Amino acid sequence: MQAQSETIAPNAVSPAGELTARLADIAREFPRAAFASSLGAEDMVLTDAILTARLPIAIFTLDTGRLPRETLELIERTQKQYGREIEVHRPDADEVARYVSGHGLNAFYESVELRKGCCHIRKVVPLTKALAGRDAWLTGLRREQSVTRAELPAREFDAAHGLVKFNPLADWSEAEVWRYIRERDVPYNALHDRGYPSIGCDPCTRAIRPGEDVRAGRWWWESRDNKECGIHASPIGKQSEGQTS
């Protein structure tokens, strides 16, 4: 994953500098903006950019109750390195218990419907609660990540939550992400070094094989064209506000 160095032309703004400017613009326009971090490599880039520039953008993550140990350790390392608490939102324990009692602990392997039901309880509902009172939210999504994100805008309107949604790294390449991480010594999930480019819940994520899509390890038993949990679904009636880049 080691990225090659590149030469920045004189007077040109570096990708890191451009990112900071984008985030500062968002913070000025939306004073109650929040960044939803899944603690992936892209999310750690945004976390570093927000915290090192001391931007007034809240950062939170979702602890589904089934995250890998390495992901939980990353939360602690991040808070220690930057000296700032990361908000952690968890699913309703009673809802999780009802799902497990009615379908089984690992029912998500049985059908897409049951898998999305689990994601809804553990991710979608907690996200909705975390976004309450916000006026915009940010993600670390990139267009290169999957076929479902190929036309991802840098700015859009999220009709499901009634908020403007920003994807500041939409046009970044994987090489740019890792260059930023290496050059700035940004903490990242140890699983990335073990063949996990995309990391979700422990039972739903595996390492990918050479030549596979970067999200092939997510819900690997399902169709490669449907690798979303519902958090970033595009509901009917969604309106685009255009791109910021």
Image (cartoon, helix red, strand yellow):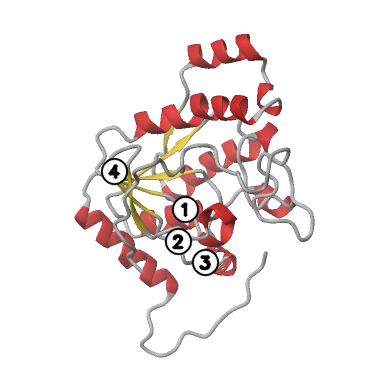
Task: Please state which amino acid type lies under the numbered disc 2.
Answer: Leu
**N-terminal label among 2 and 3:** 2
Residue linked to disc 1: 140
Q: Do the numbered discs 2 and 3 sit on residues whose CB atoms are within 8 Å? A: no
Above or below, comparing residue 133 to residue 186 in the picture: above
* Residue on which disc 2 sits: 169
Q: Picture coordinates of residue 48 (x, y %)?
A: 44, 56
From the viewer's perspective, tell me whether residue 92 is left or right of residue 26: right
Image coordinates for residue 139, horizontal then vertical, percent: 43, 50
Identity of the residue drawn at 64% across and 40% down: 70
> Which of the 4 image quadrants contains residue 218?
top right
Q: Earlier in the sequence, mark 1 or mark 2?
A: 1
For mark 3, give the secondary structure: helix
Q: Nearer the viewer, mark 3 or mark 4?
A: 4
Q: Which mark is residue 163?
A: 4
Distance from the alpha carbon under mark 4 to that under mark 2 = 18 Å
